[in-house]
Image (tube, rainbow, N blue to C red):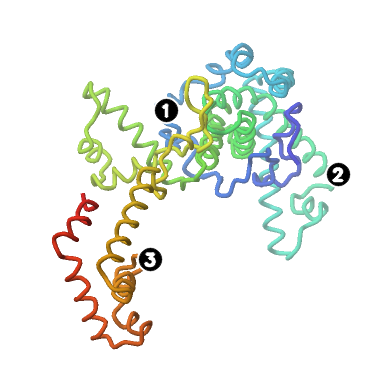
């Protein structure tokens, strides 16, 4: 069931198991392969994804981005559901540095519990009870429940307080083929993962760390869902690299780079580069309306190569009639039938000598003789001149 946009809690995974795949999805989400790379994407993830320039990690994205949320989105989208989401989101204040560290340490308890649960499940061949979990942590069951409750609450608070960052990043990717609420949803999943993986002892702010997880979630869902024909992630990354390289070479050379220069910079052959450029073309619906008044569908303007034009159909009909008249006037009935079968004048498919002989109960050689005699008649100048007109 799709989550309500009126509550930011929909972005939070409630159980103490923190599998990101259990997060709620909106109606547009059927996302196989939209997985997070835990090792390579935070914070040294390839920032060429999405075709943007590299950003400085020392700049706090929250401070830079959240100031524009309240004003910019009212101008961008007037949808009531989105407006209600923003209003609800604004209820939760940003965290102070000491609050952020304290909450992150409580959230880390959830990750420890999940790791312990997996370990005990392997040992016991079943899901461990809360009492068994508490014993493994050397605490009472009540204390375990208490710590679990506060850890969940801390995670919810961290996510709610940073939803502004999700919306700010999602705003950069409007009009990319994915609905805005879906971008927010995927960014919230990235924020959820960031809350689980964040280590406050590293010394950097949570918003700096979460920025890359949020951005990865959004760009990956665009790569998976924006196109009518889905491209593999590695192809999308190559396309982003191509776009970034084109931009950099254009700045260096003060002109558009040539195919050879692009291929050399990307370490590709010209054939591979042309193939990649073919892939980047976007599909367009045949029902797409064009023109000043958008009153014409694209389908109406495209030529059907398999259908003859009225003029061509008329010419073909006249040619067939002329050939039939010539054969009737010059050849005998049997000669006309044999020539028609041999060259597919009536059926559209030529027949072999054996096939024609079987139809007329004649030998292959006899059919060849009749065909030769008929062709000799058709090559007479006065006959051939009537047919040559159709060879132009």
Whole-angstrom CA distance, mark 3 to mark 2, is 92 Å
Percent position of residue 113, x then y: 71, 47
The vertical placement of 261 against 77, above or below, is below
136 horizontally vs 101: left or right: right
Number of other residues with Cα within 10 Å of mark 2, as a class: few under 14, some 14 to 19, many 20 or more: few
Sequence-wise first label, 3 or 2: 2
User: In terms of sequence position, does the residue under pointer 1 or pointer 3 come before the other?
Assistant: 1
**Circles 3 and 2: CB atoms closer than 8 Å:** no
Residue under numbered circle 1 = 52
Q: CA distance from mark 1 to mark 3?
A: 63 Å
Residue that badge 2 annotates: 142
At x 55%, y 44%, the residue is: 36
Q: Give the foreground label among 1 and 2.
A: 1
Position above or below: 386 against 270 = below
**Which residue in the protein does label 3 denote?**
346
Residue in the image at 25% along x and 44% along y: 267
């Amino acid at each position: 069931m799709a989550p309500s946009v009126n509550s930011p809690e929909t972005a939070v995974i409630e159980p103490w198991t923190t599998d990101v795949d259990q997060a709620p999805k909106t109606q547009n989400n059927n996302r196989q392969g939209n997985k997070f790379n835990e090792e390579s994407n935070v914070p040294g993830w390839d920032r060429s994804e999405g075709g943007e320039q590299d950003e400085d990690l020392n700049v706090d994205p929250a401070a830079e981005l959240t100031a524009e949320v309240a004003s910019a989105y009212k101008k961008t989208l007037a949808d009531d559901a989105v407006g209600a989401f923003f209003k609800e989101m604004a209820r939760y204040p940003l965290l102070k540095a000491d609050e952020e560290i304290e909450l992150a340490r409580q959230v880390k308890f959830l990750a420890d519990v999940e790791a312990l649960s997996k370990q005990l499940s392997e040992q016991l061949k079943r899901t461990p009870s809360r009492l068994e979990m508490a014993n493994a942590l050397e605490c009472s069951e009540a204390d375990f429940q208490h710590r679990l409750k506060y850890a969940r609450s801390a995670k919810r608070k961290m996510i709610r307080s940073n939803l502004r960052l999700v919306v700010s990043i999602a705003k950069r990717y409007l009009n990319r083929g994915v609905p805005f609420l879906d971008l927010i949803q995927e960014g919230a999943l990235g924020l959820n993962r960031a809350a689980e993986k964040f280590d406050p002892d590293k010394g950097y702010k949570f918003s700096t760390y979460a920025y890359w997880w949020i951005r990865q979630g959004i760009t990956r869902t665009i790569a998976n869902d924006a196109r009518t024909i889905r491209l593999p992630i590695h192809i999308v990354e190559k396309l982003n690299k191509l776009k970034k390289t084109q931009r950099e070479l254009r700045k260096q050379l003060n002109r558009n780079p040539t195919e050879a220069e692009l291929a050399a910079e990307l370490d590709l052959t010209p054939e591979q580069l042309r193939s990649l450029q073919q892939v980047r073309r976007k599909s367009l619906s045949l029902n797409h309306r064009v023109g000043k008044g958008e009153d014409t569908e694209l389908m109406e303007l495209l030529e059907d190569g398999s259908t003859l034009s009225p003029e061509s159909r008329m010419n073909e009909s006249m040619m067939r009639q002329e050939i039939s008249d010539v054969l009737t006037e010059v050849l005998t009935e049997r000669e006309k039938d044999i020539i028609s079968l041999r060259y597919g004048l009536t059926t559209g498919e030529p027949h072999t000598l054996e096939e024609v002989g079987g139809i007329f109960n004649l030998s292959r050689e006899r059919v060849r003789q009749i065909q030769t005699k008929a062709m000799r008649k058709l090559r007479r100048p006065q006959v051939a001149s009537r047919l040559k007109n159709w060879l132009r």
